[in-house]
Image (spheres, rainbow, N blue to C red):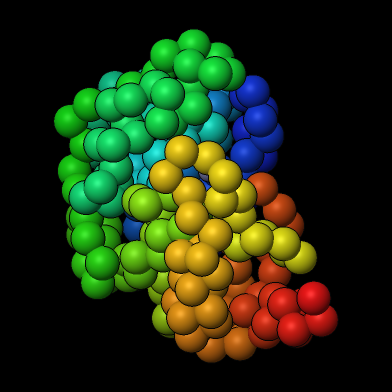
């Protein structure tokens, strides 16, 4: 099951639960704020969170991650280049918005890795490196469930910002064309700041522009 929880911090952001229906173990993706609300959902639904995963490391996607890690006793996973952001409040934009936030001691993944639950092959997520919004941005893809968590690479009807530190328009568009649009058209896209969409729908939109 996928549960979308819009969390409100300095920005509103979509946090996602991706949970195995059989075992109720799962992942929490991009817990950007409001740890208390997320913990309540976990306890009310008897979820067991095996891993916290970050699509990229702007503060509005990880703002609740430290508190969740401490309460849930599970690791935080991020791309191998993520420390550039996680350890630097200017790069992760927290200093400019809410005051310095950093996250230490994360577990790193790289392009092509499969992130799995501790005791089930359900809900496994393939890491697809998709830089441009940031140099540590990834898509998290499950072929069987036909879904991709895309962070801020692409939204319903628009594309990610490429003007923040480390952003690059040319590389972002290349990631969208070669990584997002390489997925099957019926793949449901779950982004950080919009309603869900599909790869096919965004291809049509993109051509119209
Ligand atoms: Zn971002």
Of 168 and 57, the residue lying toward us = 168
Of 146 and 91, the residue lying toward us = 91
Q: Is residue 208 above or below residue 97?
A: below
Please indicate, yes or no, whether residue 17 appears anywhere in the rendered image: no
Q: Quadrant of residue 140?
A: bottom left
Picture residue at 41% right of the left edge, 54% below the top: 137
Q: Position of residue 84 (x, y in %)?
A: 28, 37
Q: Is residue 155 above or below residue 200?
A: above
Q: Position of residue 197 (x, y in %)?
A: 70, 69
Picture residue at 62% right of the left edge, 39% below the top: 13
Picture residue at 49% right of the left edge, 11% below the top: 99
Q: Position of residue 11 (x, y in %)?
A: 66, 30
Q: Position of residue 176 (x, y in %)?
A: 53, 72
* Furthest-top residue in this view: 99
Q: Quadrant of residue 37?
A: top right
Of 39 and 138, the residue lying toward us = 138
In the rendered view, does 164 fall on the left or right side of 130? right
Q: Quadrant of residue 157?
A: bottom right
Please indicate, yes or no, whether residue 207 appears anywhere in the rendered image: yes
In the rendered view, does 136 fall on the left or right side of 113? right
């Amino acid at each position: 099951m996928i549960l979308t929880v819009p969390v409100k911090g300095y920005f509103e952001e979509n946090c996602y639960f991706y949970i195995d229906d059989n075992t109720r173990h799962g992942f929490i993706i991009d817990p950007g704020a409001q740890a208390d609300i997320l913990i309540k959902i976990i306890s009310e639904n008897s979820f067991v969170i095996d891993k916290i995963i970050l699509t990229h490391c702007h503060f509005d996607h990880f703002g609740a991650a430290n508190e969740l890690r401490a309460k849930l006793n599970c690791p935080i996973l991020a791309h191998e280049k993520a420390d550039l952001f996680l350890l630097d409040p200017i790069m992760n934009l927290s200093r400019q918005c809410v005051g310095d936030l950093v996250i230490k001691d994360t577990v790193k993944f790289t392009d092509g890795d499969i992130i799995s639950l501790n005791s089930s092959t359900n809900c496994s997520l393939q890491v697809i490196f998709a830089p441009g919004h940031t140099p540590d941005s990834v898509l998290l893809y499950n072929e069987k469930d036909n879904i991709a968590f895309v962070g801020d690479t692409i939204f319903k009807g628009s594309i990610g910002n490429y003007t923040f530190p480390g952003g690059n328009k040319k590389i972002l568009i290349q990631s969208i064309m070669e990584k997002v649009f390489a997925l099957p058209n019926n793949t449901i896209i779950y982004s950080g700041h919009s309603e869900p969409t599909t790869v096919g729908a965004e291809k049509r939109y993109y051509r119209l522009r």
